[in-house]
Amino acid sequence: MQELTLSPGPAKLTPTLDPTHRMELILSTSPAELTLDPACQPKLPLDSTCQPEMTFNPGPTELTVDPEHQPEETPAPSLAELTLEPVHRRPELLDACADLINDQWPRSRASRLHSLGQSSDAFPLCLMLLSPHPTSEAAPIVVGHARLSRVLNQPQSLLVETVVVARALRGRGFGRCLMEGLEVFARARGFRKLHLTTHDQVHFYTHLGYQLGKPVQGLVFTSRRLPATLLNAFPTGPSPRPPWKAPNLTAQAAPRGPKGLPLPPPPPLPECLTTSPPVPSGPPSKSLLETQYQNVRGRPVFWMEKDI
């Protein structure tokens, strides 16, 4: 059997051999020290707290990445490789095109996809500016978008709407490439004038040859089953009130008083008051900093046009 004895003195481990092979272990309450053989283990002094200490270097941290595993940056699209294609001919790119437009004008995704789904060769028609993907097996990258609609009573004109270029690619000539592609696309189909509106890109379109013009009405839909006379029946703006005419009082017999004398004529009737604003006369202002048109939120709207 083995005997364990506790003593207040220093800790000693004294193996004692006796006839019965007993071992005596004496422990004390003083702090214990453990020393490891330097030939086998590094020196690790332990104190009563036995808490490890960690030191941080206040200098800058250096991170070295293996060049073989560094991600490759996607090169910017080349203007010479861009193509212009209708959305309805590339249905696999509908989601990417919707994301591009919603990044500029947030809208319900379902509503945006429905609007893009209305694109057709009969107009309205949505065009995408595409760049080939660096990986030949992947789908092209949607760089820009624009929508073309017919103009009421102007068979050789188109209205350009929803012009947008990816944010990361703006200022590199992609907007100009998109607009020039629209002109080529429209001319090839017999159109001779483009119309558009803008709030803050007047100088950009001026450099492309656009000038301030008059408002036009784009056709939301066109169908060969609907004759043009039916479309023209819808009003293009608030209907003006018919001119007001005062009743003819001279044809009526003048009323007479109790003694047979004619009564004095009644005072003249007030002029007809209309609530509609007066229609501006003459061509619109040619200043690039002023416009007489505003949207429902009060923002200035610049109508611009270009012969192509």
Image (cartoon, grey):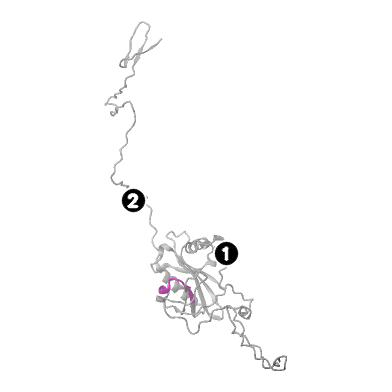
Question: Which amino acid, by three-letter code, is at mark 2?
Answer: Pro
Residue 16 x/y as whole percent: 33, 10
Direction from residue 24 to residue 243 in the image, left or right: right
Quadrant hosting residue 239:
bottom right
Q: Which residue is mark 2?
A: 67
- The 10 Å Cα crowd at callout 2, few under 14, some 14 to 19, many 20 or more, is few
Q: Is residue 267 above or below residue 199?
A: below
Label 2 and label 1: CA atoms lie apart by 45 Å
Residue 37 x/y as whole percent: 28, 24
Question: Which amino acid, by three-letter code, is at mark 1?
Answer: His
Q: Which residue is mark 1?
A: 114
Res. 106 mark: none
- The 10 Å Cα crowd at callout 1, few under 14, some 14 to 19, many 20 or more, is few
Mark 2 vs 1, N-terminal side: 2
- Point out the stretch of residues depicted in magenta: 195-204
Direction from residue 110 to residue 22 in the image, left or right: left
